[in-house]
Image: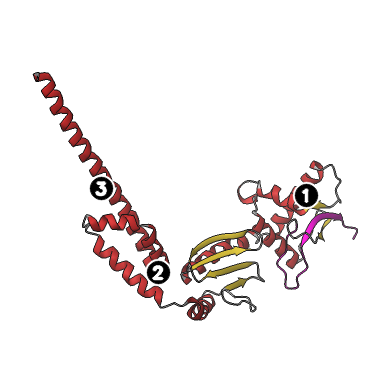
Amino acid sequence: MSISKTLRLSAEKIQTLASQEVDKLESQLKDAKAICKLATALSTYAQRSYYLHILELRTKQADLIHRAQQSCHSACIDILKIFEIAEAEANKLMPLNIRFPTAFSQACQNENLKIDSDSRHPKYTFDNRFFEVKLDETKKMAYVSNYEAGKLEGIPADIPAIIECLQRHRKRVFDKAKNDAVFLKLLRQEYLKSVKAYHKKDGDSIPIRFVIDSLAKRKDSDKYQADEFVVALSQILKEGQTKIDGFQLDLQQTKNTKDGVLPITENNRGYVGFLLFRKCHD
């Protein structure tokens, strides 16, 4: 064998071994970063008492944890201890159908969240049935929704997490409804745009979904998602702030629950399908 061939084969062997070593180190680095990310999540969940969230991580990251155990990673003992403690804490709320209702009711009371009086486990409603929390006892999951947007989030059924999720969405929709005058002005603007677009005249009725879709396309603070629109509309109806520039907002009902919206009112006024602005004569 020639010297050049011998050298080439030796170099190729070194290259193969070095490449394998690089692959191994890259794999170890990837797992190390994943464990660091896992530890950050565990720390956050532990601080918030999200024990079912921790157990969900155990399931989702089973392969990573197995590799860490196989390589005797230094973090393994602590990670497994966290899972053990989280499981013991989560079991204190089991079975959900017996222990959850009282604990959840007390937690809501502590956070000034009023559960509707006709709520029954595993469904809890808030704000005259606008928001709903539904428990899946088998999966130990909670689904937060409202009747306009549908499902908003599905999360492990840790009570602090459910309350945080519910409060976040309530804040989003109710904060948006605080300025009656701004909303009514935007409503009037979008109504006039729809009137023009559909070759109608001011005073004609317009499907309310036309206006909702149009408001959802606006930018920044002028943008209203459908559930934010319903809450803002409910607020101006409650406050009686429905007059602007000599025109009175008027709503017309529909039997079509898909095309209509249901304002949040004490006495259910039914689904609203159309809106218009009538000239005031007083």
Residue 214 position in % (x across, y down): 70, 47
In the rendered view of the protein, which quadrant contains the C terminus?
A: bottom right
Label 1 crowding class (10 Å Cα cut-off): few <14, some 14-19, many 20+? many
In the rendered image, which quarter is residue 35 located in?
A: bottom left
Residue at horizontal 37 percent and vertical 67 percent from the top: 47
**Which residue, given by chain and number where applicable, does mark 1 sit on?**
191
Image mark for residue 51: 2
Mark 3 or 1 closer to N-term?
A: 3
Mark 1, mark 2: which one is toward the viewer?
2
- Is 271 inside the magenta-drawn segment? yes
Q: What type is the residue that disc 2 sits on? A: Tyr
On the image, the x and y values in percent for residue 279 come to 87, 54
Quarter of the image where one finds residue 176? bottom right
User: Which residue is most to the right?
Assistant: 281
Instruction: Tell me which amino acid carries mark 1.
Output: Tyr
Q: Which residue is drawn at 62% across and 76% down?
A: 119
Type of residue at label 3? Gln
Pointers 3 and 2 in contact (C-beta within 8 Å): no
Q: Position of residue 207 (x, y in %)?
A: 79, 52
189 versus 118 height, above or below:
above
Which residue has dot 3 on it?
Answer: 28
Q: From which residue to which does the magenta span run?
A: 260-282
Look at 57% across and 59% down and name the residue there: 152
Q: How far apart are marks 3 and 1 (CA)?
A: 60 Å
Mark 1 residue element: helix
Residue 132: in magenta span: no
Q: Is mark 2 on a helix, strand or loop?
A: helix
Q: Is mark 3 on a helix, strand or loop?
A: helix
Q: Residue at x 72, y 60 (%)?
A: 233
Quarter of the image with the N terminus is top left
